Amino acid sequence: MKSRLVEKFRVNFGRAPEFIARAPGRIEFIGNHTDYNGGPVLGAAIDRQVWVALARRAGGERRFGSDQRGELVTRPADRVEKLSGAQSWVNYPLGVLGALPAFGLRAPAGFDYFALSDLPPGAGLSSSAAIELASALVFLAAAGENPPRETLVKIGRQAENDFVGVPCGILDQGVSGFGKKDHLVFIDCRGPHFATVPLPGDARFWIFNTHTKHALVDGLYAERHRECLEAAQGLGVGLLAEVSPAAVLAAEKKLSPPVFRRARHIVEEIARVDTTVKALRAGDLAAVGQLLNASHRSSQTLFENSTPELDFLAETLAATPHVYGARLTGGGFGGAVMALTAESFGAFQARAVAAAYAKTFGAAPDILQAQTGDGATLVPV
Ligand code: ADP
Ligand code: MG
């Protein structure tokens, strides 16, 4: 990837880059809708990433290129304005540049910039966080700044929330920033605090992207968020993370049936994240797989953010040899299912699952195999 990036940079700008950074995509491993309820979440940085190269240039222009877009986009260095249409991908690096002053950090003035990636965009793997963090690293290096990793994560999130306008939680940037090969990233969303937990050796990830999306998905997220707040209020706490599963079960009468189901999912999912960490530390991937399956069933029956497509994949995968467990990954109401498998699970089995899905639903899902990878870093040029 690096030599291809340098080559692309030369072709577009006629010179070598001064700074190169890479940042990985991520999977939500377990911890479904726990973030805004103050709970923990486990994610994995994967071995697919966005690479960014940059060289400073005299004068007041910033030129942006990407392998995914044909034309260079030229912007004046003294203004950060939102772009639309074919140029809107530049809002990710622009959002990062715009966020730097709020953290007391300088931005480089004129530069040439090129992005190259093997991380499919829009597949639920957070290519957006990856491009934000890789961009932030080269901008900061060019400006002679070196903030802590927590700040890098916050800059990326602020770019996405406030400039691009996507209200994502801390998972995306947190995992891209703190990922580590052969580890999962544990995020306590209240701090947020970040830690890594070893993932035993022979684990692999397979992601099946259905490319389905509920027509009302934004409204449904907002509704779930509201229901969780209503449950917390009904239980006399600020956030659901402050209540135990037993306390929620005992308070069933205080909540409407759907609000009770949402609350039960959240508090039990929070407990599952903690149990997953213990099972990982014990090297017990079979137990981890059961927790993934239980998480999916809870999404299906209690949080009601699954779909027939996701249920089909999760259930078929869970019943397939060499699969530890499977669950929907991300917000739900469409999207992708992730399976945790042994190394012995291969493309042949994955294609059989996809073929069974295609028979029922018409079109095959995209299949992507991944392993854990390292978090965002500058790379020597
Ligand atoms: P996800 O984060 O799940 O991949 P998003 O819609 O949040 O999906 O982000 C995808 C967007 O991020 C793309 O449409 C594009 O604007 C931007 N992006 C990601 N990777 C690249 C890249 N290599 N080059 C240019 N833009 C990219
Ligand atoms: Mg995204």
Image (tube, rainbow, N blue to C red):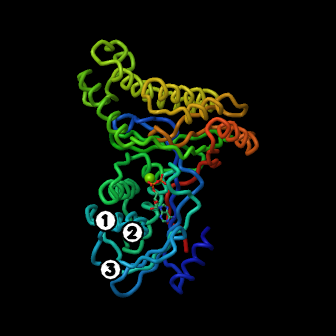
State the residue position of label 1.
100
Which element carries disc 1, helix, strand or loop?
helix
Depth check: give the residue in front, 318 or 269: 318
Residue 170 picture location, percent across and down: 38, 47
Picture quadrant where residue 8 is located? bottom right
Quadrant in the rendering for residue 102: bottom left
Q: How far apart are marks 3 and 1 (CA)?
A: 17 Å
- The amino acid at mark 3 is Pro
Front label number (3 vs 2): 3
The answer to whether the residue bearing label 1 lies less than 8 angstroms from the nearest atom of ligand 1 is: no
Q: Is residue 166 above or below residue 184?
A: below
In the picture of the structure, the residue carrying the numbered disc 3 is: 76
Q: In this view, does 55 lie above or below 317?
A: below
Q: Determine the secondary structure under disc 3.
A: strand
Residue 15 position, x and y percent, is 53, 85
Label 2 amino acid? Leu
Classify mark 1: residues with Cα within 10 Å, few (<14), some (14-19) or many (20+).
many
Residue at 62%, 73% (x, y): give it.
4
Marks 1 and 3: in contact by CB < 8 Å? Answer: no
